Amino acid sequence: MTLFDPTTRQVLATKPLGAVVRWLSNEQRYWDGRSIWTYDFPDNRVQAIAVDPAAIAVSRTIPTGGAGPAHSLMLTPDLQTAWVNVAGGDYLAVIDLASGEVAAEVRTGKFP
């Protein structure tokens, strides 16, 4: 992970994260005020991950119970839940961030 100063475009720090961050978009809500939320699918198992930008480390992982791949994670406007697609399972996992549990699975059909 590389942090940089957006005003000077200078690199501030680079450190291995221990996860593969495949997608962050400025069109999606992924910042909760403390952590950058995204996803990973090590061993083809989709999980939500929270990245602490100050420590440059994964601070939390929440398994979805589903097979990968995944393509996106987005926080709800109230920052209470995250939705991540579990393409190998053909559903969207709704994750309660407070409890760290999958609150619901929304079936979508093939490869959401």
Image (tube, rainbow, N blue to C red):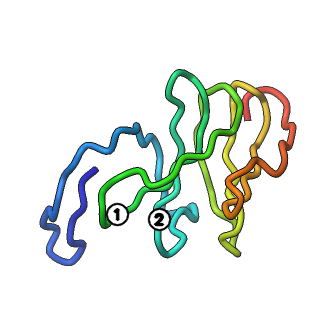
**Residue 13 location (% of width, % of height):** 17, 59
Residue designated by label 1: 53
Residue designated by label 2: 35
Q: Residue at x 40, y 39 (%)?
A: 19
Q: Is residue 25 left or right of residue 97?
A: left
Question: Is residue 72 or residue 93 the one in the foreground?
Answer: 93
Instruction: Please say if the residues under marks 1 and 2 sit with CB atoms less than 8 Å apart.
Output: yes
Q: Secondary structure at mark 1?
A: loop
Crowding at label 1, few (<14), some or many (≥20) Cα neighbours within 10 Å? Answer: some
Question: Is residue 27 or residue 76 the one in the foreground?
Answer: 76
Q: Residue at x 19, y 52 (%)?
A: 14
**Residue 17 location (% of width, % of height):** 32, 44
Quarter of the image for residue 5 reads bottom left
Q: Look at label 1 and name its amino acid.
A: Pro
Q: Residue at x 42, y 43 (%)?
A: 21
Q: Look at label 2 and name its amino acid.
A: Ser
Q: Which residue is situated farthest in the top direction here?
A: 43
